[in-house]
Image (cartoon, rainbow, N blue to C red):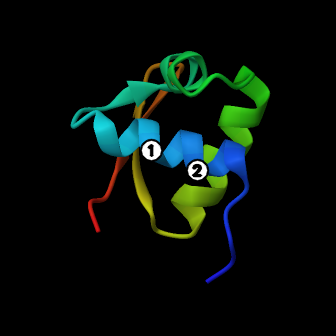
């Protein structure tokens, strides 16, 4: 497994600390990163099978898959 950079760690930590679906904007604010950074890493984590994604209209909702 590759080492995570500080932004990746904050995003995953944020998702693991909240046991419900969050929007990309919520993840970005809680993790202290830009919306674009959050969106890019969330898609990467989804593709890697680490998080779940739901689409609600124009919003993407994200939730960690517990280890």
Does residue 51 sit above or below 38 in this rendering? below
The image shows residue 55 at horizontal and vertical percentages of: 43, 33
Q: Please report contact status of discs 1 and 2: CB closer than 8 Å, yes or no.
A: yes
The image shows residue 54 at horizontal and vertical percentages of: 38, 39
* Residue at position x 67%, y 35% in the image: 39
Q: Which residue is mark 1?
A: 13
Q: Calculate the distance from the C-alpha at mark 1 to the C-alpha at mark 2.
A: 6 Å
Does residue 60 sit above or below 52 in this rendering? above
Q: Quadrant of residue 45?
A: bottom right
- Which disc, if any, is residue 61? none
Q: Which residue is mark 2?
A: 9
Quick check: 6 left or right of 10? right
Identify the element where label 1 is drawn: helix
* Residue at position x 26%, y 60% in the image: 66
**Along the viewing direction, whichever of 49 and 56 lies nearer the viewer:** 49
The image shows residue 63 at horizontal and vertical percentages of: 35, 43
Quick check: 20 left or right of 26? left
């Amino acid at each position: 497994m590759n080492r995570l950079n500080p932004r990746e760690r904050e995003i995953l930590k944020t998702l693991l600390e909240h046991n419900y679906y969050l929007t990309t904007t919520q993840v970005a604010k809680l993790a202290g990163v830009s919306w674009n950074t959050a969106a890019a890493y969330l898609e990467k984590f989804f593709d890697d099978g680490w998080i779940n994604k739901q689409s609600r209209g124009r919003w993407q909702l994200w939730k960690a898959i517990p280890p």
